[in-house]
Image (spheres, grey):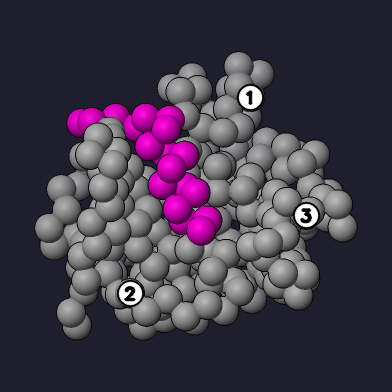
């Protein structure tokens, strides 16, 4: 199919067919989540469920993929669903405008192959992790010129480890820059595609990204 012609060379036809059968739940549809959802739709992931109870506000315009002057006040997931349908009508997009908590996280992610955490707070991240979901969870966050990401296999508690030495609320101090958000989002997508294609990712830990030094530091978790 010509739509995916530029994927060839890195993604085989059988892998492309496999992506079309995959279902990814994206939790949060703001800076990280919007960019992630667009890239997953463009590369050909078959089903996306977008979860976010928020609406666009003016301060989102500096970084959030689907925020425009016309979308201010509108549901993030509903706007994203409409935009993604224009990008790739072969992708099934489900929009859920709900608040994520311990009572609904299992139902929201039921039947998916992968969860991508694009949230902006550690409290909800811990709720997701404590739900012991049967699928991998990819998480990331940004603060100024820096960011981190990790992939937690079922049963692992990477976010719990991160909370032990990560300053909460640093994004409020250093801000969220568009280029940092986009780079971390695409790194999450890279891990997502490899996971969806059943590639074994042996590293267990965190990647810390410093865009000023252009370095990525790997910190392994020893259970």
Check the image and name the residue furthest to the left. 165
Front in this rendered view, residue 214 or 66: 214
On the rendered image, what quadrant is the N terminus found in? Answer: bottom right
Q: Secondary structure at mark 2?
A: loop
Query: Looking at the figure, which quarter contains the C terminus?
Result: bottom left
The crowding category of the residue bearing disc 3, from other C-alpha atoms within 10 Å (few below 14, some 14 to 19, many at least 20), is: few
Looking at the image, tell me whether mark 3 or mark 2 is earlier in sequence order. 3
In the image, the segment drawn in magenta is 172-190
Mark 2, residue position: 203
Q: Is residue 111 above or below residue 173?
A: below
Residue lying farthest to the right in this orientation: 1
Residue in the picture at 79% in, 53% down: 5
Q: Secondary structure at mark 1?
A: helix
Classify 68 as above or below 65.
Answer: above
Gap between marks 3 and 2 measured at Cα = 29 Å
Q: Are marks 3 and 1 in contact (CB under 8 Å)?
A: no
Residue 16 x, y percent position in the rendering? 74, 67
Rounded to the nearest angstrom, the CA distance separating label 2 from label 1 is 40 Å
Of marks 3 and 1, the one in the foreground: 3
Image point (38%, 72%), residue name: 152
Q: Which residue matches tag 3?
A: 4
- Observer-side mark, 2 or 1, equals 2
Task: Decide if residue 192 is on the left or right side of residue 112.
Answer: left
Q: Position of residue 7 (x, y in %)?
A: 70, 56
At numbered mark 3, what does the secondary structure look like: helix, strand or loop?
helix
Task: Name the residue located 63 percent from the left edge and 54 percent from the top edge.
Answer: 40
Residue 71 - label = 1
């Amino acid at each position: 199919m010509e739509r995916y012609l530029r994927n060839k060379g890195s993604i085989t036809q059988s892998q492309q067919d496999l992506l079309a059968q995959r279902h990814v739940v994206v939790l949060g549809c703001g800076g990280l989540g919007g960019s992630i959802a667009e890239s997953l739709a463009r590369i050909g992931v078959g089903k996306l469920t977008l979860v976010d109870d928020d609406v666009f506000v003016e301060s989102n315009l500096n970084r959030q993929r689907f925020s425009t002057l016309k979308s201010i006040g509108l549901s993030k997931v509903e706007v994203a669903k409409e935009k993604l349908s224009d990008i790739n009508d072969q992708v099934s997009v489900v929009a859920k405008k709900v608040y994520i908590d311990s009572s609904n996280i299992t139902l929201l992610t039921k039947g998916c192959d992968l969860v991508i955490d694009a949230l902006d707070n550690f409290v909800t991240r811990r709720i997701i992790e404590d739900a012991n979901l049967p699928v991998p969870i990819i998480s990331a966050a940004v603060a100024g010129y820096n960011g981190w990401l990790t992939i937690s296999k079922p049963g692992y508690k990477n976010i719990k480890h991160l909370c032990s030495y990560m300053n909460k609320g640093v994004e409020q101090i250093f801000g969220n820059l568009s280029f940092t958000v986009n780079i971390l989002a695409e790194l999450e997508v890279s891990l997502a595609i490899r996971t969806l294609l059943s590639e074994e990712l042996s590293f267990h830990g965190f990647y810390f990204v410093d865009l000023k030094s252009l370095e990525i530091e790997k910190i392994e978790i020893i259970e």
